[in-house]
Amino acid sequence: MIQDIEKFRKAVVTIKSSATFVLDYGNDDTAMTETLFNKVRWVTGESSDGTAIETTTNPHSEITWTKVKAEMDKL
């Protein structure tokens, strides 16, 4: 069985392959929920020192919890 976090990653890639994110999820048994989805840190660029620029405001209008959940349910 694929863990929720792996399903989430695959769902995001399916919707938008270029989207990059960081997710602090605790452990492999953590259920992916809308609450956790809203805590995703989306990578929007890179600073001059090579550090990722992140935001918790989803910059990808095509990636919504509803769409991600639907893709996860297919896996």
Image: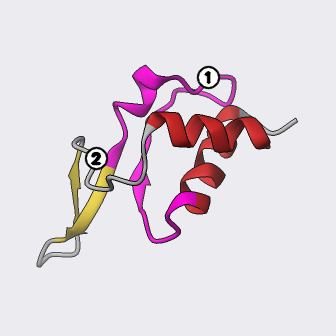
Q: Residues within 10 Å of mark 2 (few under 14, many from 20)?
A: some
**Stretch of the chain drawn in magenta:** 15-41
Residue lying furthest left in this view?
Answer: 48
Tag of residue 44 = none
- Residue for point 40% across, 49% down: 22
What residue sits 81% from the left and 39% below the top?
2
Name the side, left or right, on which 42 lies relative to 35: left
Question: Element type at marker 1?
Answer: loop
Horizontal arrangement in the rendering, residue 49 relative to residue 72 (left or right) = left
The residue indicated by pointer 1 is 30
- Quadrant where the N terminus sits is top right
Using the numbered discs, state the Cα–Cα distance from disc 2 to disc 1 in whole angstroms: 21 Å
Q: Is residue 29 above or below residue 40?
A: above
Residue at image location 55% in from the left, 42% down from the top:
68
Name the residue: 32% across, 56% down: 60
Q: Quadrant of residue 44?
A: bottom left
- Which SS does the magenta portion mostly show? loop
Residue 22 is a magenta residue: yes
Between marks 2 and 1 in the image, the one whose residue lies nearer the viewer:
2
Q: How many marks?
A: 2
**Quadrant in the picture for residue 28:** top right
Task: Indicate the amino acid at tag 1.
Answer: Thr
| Residue 74: image location, x then y, percent | 77, 42
Image quarter of the C terminus = top right
The residue wearing badge 2 is 58
Q: In this view of the protein, which residue sits in the foreground, 23 or 12?
A: 12
Question: Measured from the top left, where is residue 64 in percent x and y?
Answer: 42, 41
Q: Amino acid at mark 2?
A: Asn
Q: Is residue 29 above or below residue 71?
A: above
Q: Is residue 64 above or below residue 59?
A: above
In the picture as drawn, the residue positioned furthest to the right comes out as 1
